[in-house]
Amino acid sequence: MIRIILAGLFLILFLILTIPLMLITWLIGRIFPHAGDVSSLAIVNWGFRCLQVICGIKLKVLGAERVPKDTPVLYVANHRSLFDVVVTYPLVARPTGFISKKEILKVPLLNIWMALLHCLFLDRKDPRSGMNMILKAIELEKKGISVFVFPEGTRKRDYNTDDLLMMHNGSFKIATKAGVPIVPVAIAGTENIMAKHIPFVRSAKVTIAFGEPVDPKTLSKEELKEIGNYFGRIIQDSYLNIKESVR
């Protein structure tokens, strides 16, 4: 119980005490957009790293050197828990907007930080929201900002199986329309932090494996037609290779 209390207190203090920094990075971003993006990313990533220490997360990262640093990419990953964002955000190679559900907009101050970081919000009950989100994500990619998405669409799952949920094809249009590489990401172990024993936070091993970037232009018509399944298999195989490391 002590870990969840400490994590909650840290999050509240972080959101309150960084209000001045929030305003400064916003002002910087109005004049120098890239500098504003980099400073916002650095501040939030520091907060996430502190949360990792507080929660006792033992993180192992594989293949981070594969991610291109000179071009935006579309990260696609399996979704295990809320902590997926906490462990992956500090690893992105450049300013990156995560796609999240619109309910996060109700969290004061956190919603502002997410907006500064170019995060996009999806209303799962509104079909038009999905299309609008994809169009906004394509524009971000064209501006040089990467996008990170969880194509399974939900973190709700049976933790007794290693099978991934179906990955929706729509999310991959961000890369095919923007002409950016797709980086598959496998995440293992984040459910052991809290999702499997809510509300308790427990120390856990987490492994993240970045796969080889894939240029959508190199895929066949058949592969593009079933692109969700194509990357689902890549991530599934990678997950099976790393899952034993978090036992």
Image: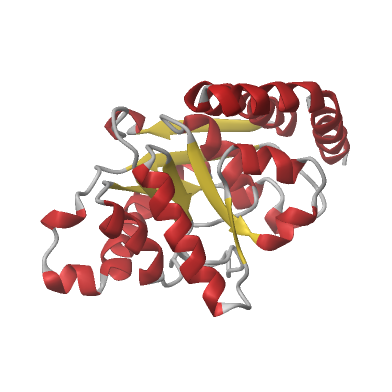
What residue is shown at x 82% (from left), y 53% (from top)? 199
Q: Position of residue 91 (x, y in %)?
A: 47, 31
Nearer to the camera, 241 or 69: 69
What residue is shown at x 59% (from left), y 62% (from top)? 155
Q: Position of residue 65 (x, y in %)?
A: 31, 27
Q: Position of residue 82 (x, y in %)?
A: 65, 51
Looking at the image, residue 21 sits to the left or right of residue 222; the answer is right
What residue is shown at x 73% (from left), y 61% (from top)? 103
Rendering quarter of residue 118: top right
Nearer to the camera, 173 or 222: 173
Please determine whether, in this image, residue 49 is positioned above or below residue 117.
above
Please determine whether, in this image, residue 171 is positioned above or below residue 16.
below
Looking at the image, residue 239 sits to the left or right of residue 89; the answer is left
The answer to whether residue 204 shows anywhere in this view is yes
The answer to whether residue 186 shows anywhere in this view is no
Rendering quarter of residue 69: top left
The colour mode here is secondary structure
**Quadrant of the image for the N terminus?**
top right
What residue is shown at x 58% (from left), y 69% (from top)? 157
Q: Position of residue 166 (x, y in %)?
A: 42, 72
Nearer to the camera, 205 or 102: 102
Looking at the image, residue 102 sits to the left or right of residue 218; the answer is right
Rendering quarter of residue 196: bottom right
Q: How many marks?
A: 0
